[in-house]
Amino acid sequence: MSVTRCKITLSNGQRYTLRDPEDIGGIDSNRTALFVFNNGQIYRGCTDGEVDDDGDFCLSKKDTHHRIGLPFDRLLGWAYEKEG
């Protein structure tokens, strides 16, 4: 079995190797992550990794109660944001 690693470079020069979308269930909900979608959009925030019956997962900023639902089936991958 071969695994393809998706790598991205942000405009600030930071490089990330994305984790598989299926790994979102094991995400640390206390760490900020980047989420890359198939339309090129990148979202930043925290999630508990649970996908609801509609196929969405919720994303929030650290220490807030405001959340948005994002479509799991459009997620290409995710990576923990680098500290510093």
Image: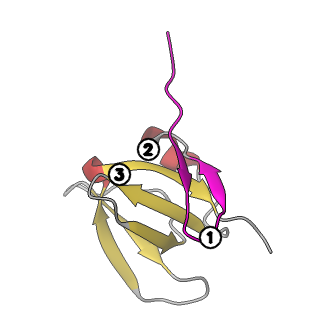
First in sequence: mark 2 vs mark 1:
2
- Dot 2 amino acid type: Pro
Give neighbour class at mark 2: few <14, some 14-19, many 20+ (Cα, 10 Å): some
Q: CA distance from mark 2 to mark 1?
A: 16 Å
User: Is 63 left, or right, of 72 in this rendering?
Assistant: right
Residue at numbered disc 2? 21
Tag 2 secondary structure:
helix
Residue at numbered disc 3? 75
Which image quadrant: the C terminus? bottom right
Contact? badges 2 and 3 (CB < 8 Å): yes
- Dot 1 amino acid type: Thr
Which residue occupies 60% across, 82% down? Answer: 62
Quadrant housing residue 29: bottom right
Magenta-drawn segment: 1-17
Please say whether residue 74 is one of the residues in the magenta stretch.
no
Q: Of 6 and 52, which appears nearest the observer? A: 6
- Vertical comparison of 62 with 29: above or below: below
Per the picture, the main secondary structure of the magenta-coloured stretch is loop
Tag 1 secondary structure:
loop
Q: Which mark is residue 32?
A: 1
Q: Where in the figure is residue 81, as x and y percent of width and height?
A: 65, 65
